[in-house]
Image (spheres, rainbow, N blue to C red):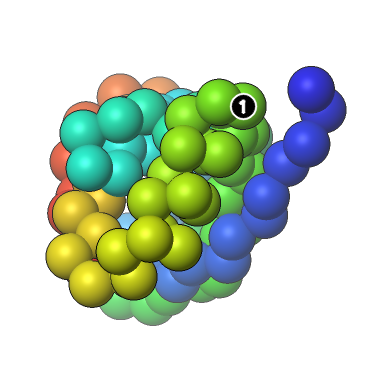
């Protein structure tokens, strides 16, 4: 469908050396339903013990996102129960990501 949602996040590097984030691939789930794929190939270098802003590209899944919006209108935004599952390529290594979003 070509629609994309860009979301800025801050990524921290707690190590003593520069970290090169080559890409992030994943899926955003809300209430157990996959509502968007994430495909970001920005190529960001994050300084040792530093942080950097990264833009994630969300590609909504048509009917699922419509269903979610209808549910949020009916029930409000409390207890959204979102989860981001994917992997980041950092310095050539695939690092799993599994993060709950409140």
Q: Decide which of 12, 73 is in the foreground and name it.
A: 73
| Label 1 neighbour load within 10 Å: few <14, some 14-19, many 20+ | few
Residue 96 in the image: x percent, y percent? 21, 31
Query: Would residue 84 be visible to someone looking at this image?
Result: no
Residue 69 in the image: x percent, y percent? 50, 51
Residue at the right extreme of this rendering:
2
Residue at the bottom extreme of this rendering:
50
Residue 43 shown left or right of residue 93 in the figure:
right
Q: Decide which of 12, 83 is in the foreground and name it.
A: 83
Is 62 drawn above or below residue 3 in the view shown? Answer: above
Residue 8 in the image: x percent, y percent? 58, 66
Q: Where, by quadrant of the figure, is residue 59 drawn?
A: top right
Task: Tell me the residue at 31%/37% (across/down).
Answer: 29
Residue 92 shown left or right of residue 101 in the figure:
right
Residue at the front extreme of this rendering:
74
Residue at mark 1:
62
């Amino acid at each position: 469908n070509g629609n994309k949602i860009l979301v800025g996040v801050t990524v921290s590097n707690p190590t003593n050396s520069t970290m090169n984030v080559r890409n992030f691939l994943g899926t955003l789930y809300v209430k157990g339903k996959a509502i968007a794929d994430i495909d970001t190939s920005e190529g960001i270098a994050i300084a040792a013990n530093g942080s950097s802003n990264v833009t994630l590209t969300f590609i909504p899944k048509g009917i699922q996102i419509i269903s979610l919006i209808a549910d949020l209108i009916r029930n409000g935004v409390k207890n959204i129960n979102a989860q981001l599952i994917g992997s980041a390529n950092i310095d050539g290594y695939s690092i799993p990501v599994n993060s709950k979003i409140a």
